[in-house]
Amino acid sequence: MKTKLVKDLKEAIKLSGLSDGMTISFHHHLRNGDMVAVMVLDVISELGIRDLNVNISSIFDTHAPFIEYIRDGVITGIETDYMGGVVGRAVSEGILDKPVIFRTHGGRPSDIISGVSPIDVAFIAAPTADPMGNCTGKYGKSACGSLGYAFADAMYAKTSVVITDNLVDYPLTDFSIAEDYIDYVVCVDKIGEPSGIVSGTTKITKDPVGLVIADYAARAIEASGLLVDGFSFQTGAGGASLAAAKYLQDIMLARGIKGSYGLGGITSYMVDMMKSGCFKALLDVQCFDLGAVESIRTNPNHREVSASHYASPSAASSAVDSLDVVILGATEIDTNFNVNVHTDSNGYIMGGSGGHSDTAAGAKMSMIVAPLSRARLPIVVDEVLCKSTPGSTVDVLVTQRGIAVNPLRPELSEKFAAAGLPVVDIRELRDAAEKQNGKAKKPTLGNKEVAKVLYRDGTLLDTIYNVPVK
Amino acid sequence: MKTKLVKDLKEAIKLSGLSDGMTISFHHHLRNGDMVAVMVLDVISELGIRDLNVNISSIFDTHAPFIEYIRDGVITGIETDYMGGVVGRAVSEGILDKPVIFRTHGGRPSDIISGVSPIDVAFIAAPTADPMGNCTGKYGKSACGSLGYAFADAMYAKTSVVITDNLVDYPLTDFSIAEDYIDYVVCVDKIGEPSGIVSGTTKITKDPVGLVIADYAARAIEASGLLVDGFSFQTGAGGASLAAAKYLQDIMLARGIKGSYGLGGITSYMVDMMKSGCFKALLDVQCFDLGAVESIRTNPNHREVSASHYASPSAASSAVDSLDVVILGATEIDTNFNVNVHTDSNGYIMGGSGGHSDTAAGAKMSMIVAPLSRARLPIVVDEVLCKSTPGSTVDVLVTQRGIAVNPLRPELSEKFAAAGLPVVDIRELRDAAEKQNGKAKKPTLGNKEVAKVLYRDGTLLDTIYNVPVK
């Protein structure tokens, strides 16, 4: 019988045939609690392997040691869908010679499956696994729920290594990823820090400005005509988005509307909406909190989906294609409705698309909720510093000062106005933002390309340049 | 939004781009109740498309109309893992110019996934589906349980068409095959005849000879040393195999042995073994009866696996690799332990490997149960007419006249003898069979190659020649 269970990570890496110049991959379901990516890189570095391309679905601040491995030449390329501020700052300051490749959560599996971004060795952090590699995120002390982002890695990497801290007897029947894709299994003491794993959910906002925005957002959804039986919905985990979801729930319950599904990164708030009858199902590519983890483990109507099933533009279809409404955030939005979620006002990388442009493209109505300004910086601007999501796919901007509708969707304007909602031109919102805080001063950037932002179909959306170190 | 639901099969076939010379595929989960393969070929024929290669996981007598489509030049090639007697007779008489390609249930997905046997259009009979193609066999009037054999087809065909008679609202959460692989969905009145879908299970034998064999088989498993906690097991659905499983269950319950999993085509008998505590899990590539369908729908420990997960020799591992004991049948077995399950004593095709050689290769002990002779024809012979499973992977032959052990496994002989079981040389069994019924007369075959039998790894095991028509 084939033996896959090897004694430690070093042996697994040796057996995988990993060598200089190859591509390794990780998923981010353990979020800011992930210990696996750094653990693997520690061993790789110890083995003297260098010049690696790291394809990781998201980078959090827990991955700060990546910076040292970039400096040492262990990591020489990064492909990701999201990059938190710590690694983002170093990248923005030009630490990497090659530009980071940013994809979307749907574009990533699409490019892995098509062979555009091949993976040599995938390292799959798995909260529970059996010795043949059947694995899941639903159980164990490091349970994270869905393993949706890891499917393509496991299935298409030349070699796949499962790393678990909860090894169970064969066969694990409630597997997410099946043994036929897994070459080696390693059991370690701890793959993640539970508090960091479920760090994603913000609480519903109590900020009065946020609550006004949420109220407008919920009423705009009601006015759109999309809020009928069979309604499907995704929302981010930001405070105003969650408040909007809560108001929406109130409307759905009051009007007896039975939605079909909630999608995306799933929070307890979405679980509560399903439980209260607003949705018959949740399609879950990623769990944001313990309530979502508990639900996906126990409720058959809460179903894990792969990232390809969630959002791949090259799949026969994905769940975003059937989506009615998505509520999204923005760090900046310009008068052409282009949205920036990659860089801050100084040009530093501190985010990424995730599923932003996938859901914006798929949903019948994509809605950005944002205050006019944050920390005295206008959110509505003439031109975004980085185009993360093309304005042609963004339908509505909801602020505390009114709702701007993309001119491509005049019927929405009419419906909102008929419902008594304050519809305004997006340029008025820009003007109001500037009046509050002055015009945003564009940072002076260098001429080194530090990141390429690929749209979900693989075309280049934008290039991010370095922030000169003073 | 992409629309996949098309008005009828004709439109789906036109949209699929199917044209002369291509390969289409079907699965056999609806068994002898399947109406889909013939329904599709009727439309294909009506459209004037010809010269098709049909890759179907098994052919039953319900597929008799294939014969006309071969005569008409619509079907010019067949790849399958099993062929029932009706189509088998026509093929044996030389109706096809190209030899049929026989694979195993594990070899088929292996060759589909690797690209050795590419599929242009897969037609997936699905007892329940949603309009985007998420589908399952667990629900609906034509429920068949597992869709294990259809996974590779859906995932790797250039175009995949789901055909259902139970269309449900999006999203079907308990999907087996996900929408990202499905291009078109067609809803028809009826995909299968329920009585034929669950036609697979024989009852436990009441024949005294069969019961002796079953008793020896169960005691041999006990004596092998493999029947300990964690024991895993597969058995066929023949009467003696089921009786052996029943006796084994008695032993396990009496001795308090907690097995790990039952594998394979699953019957109610295996479900009962799980329920009674003999196994903690069932891994199910195919349901043989309504009890199995009910169980896979309701019991989370009864888990659907893909054919690749079940038995692919090129997968990182498959469930057969972890199997302790398999009980299998034979139409002939020779003194080198080679087994024939493809042809009858006249040389006519009437079967195929299915998972026979996959499980024989994977299991720690593979056991053939067979009477010395059937219908006055000896089962134990000098040389099988067709080598379906190589003798090197067959460990034990259990007959009513004793148990023969492959000389490659002397330790099993010793264990059986120590347990007081009647261990005999396989040549003695051959002699006894010949004494009962006379030496088997080899049929005179023609020199036209009507089928190639590929081993699970793709190598040629044997060639089947035509039976001359008198």
Image (cartoon, coloured by chain):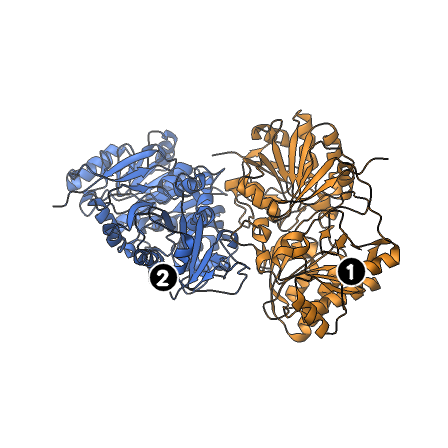
Chain colours: A orange, B blue
Q: Residue at x 22, y 49 (%)?
A: B90
Residue placed most toward the observer, B280 or B58: B58
Residue at (83% x, 58% y) in the render: A433
Tell me the quarter of the image containing the C terminus of chain A. top right
The image's mark for residue B192 is 2
Element class at badge 2: loop
Left or right: residue A145 versus residue B443 is right
Q: Which mark is residue A427?
A: 1
Alpha carbon of mark 1 to alpha carbon of mark 2: how far?
61 Å
Spot occupied by residue A377 in the image (x, y as percentages of width and height): 84, 53
Would residue B163 be seen by someone viewing this image from the given angle? yes
Q: In the image, what residue type sits under mark 2?
A: Gly
**Residue B242 % position (x, y):** 35, 51
Q: Nearer the viewer, mark 1 or mark 2?
A: 1
Q: Position of residue A424 (x, y in %)?
A: 76, 66
User: Would you place residue B177 above or below residue A74 in this image?
Assistant: below
Please tell me which residue is depicted at 82% across the width and 41% down the height of the picture.
A444
**Do the residues under discs 1 and 2 have CB atoms within 8 angstroms?**
no
Q: For mark 2, does the 10 Å Cα neighbourhood hold few (<14), some (14 to 19), or many (20 or more) residues?
A: many
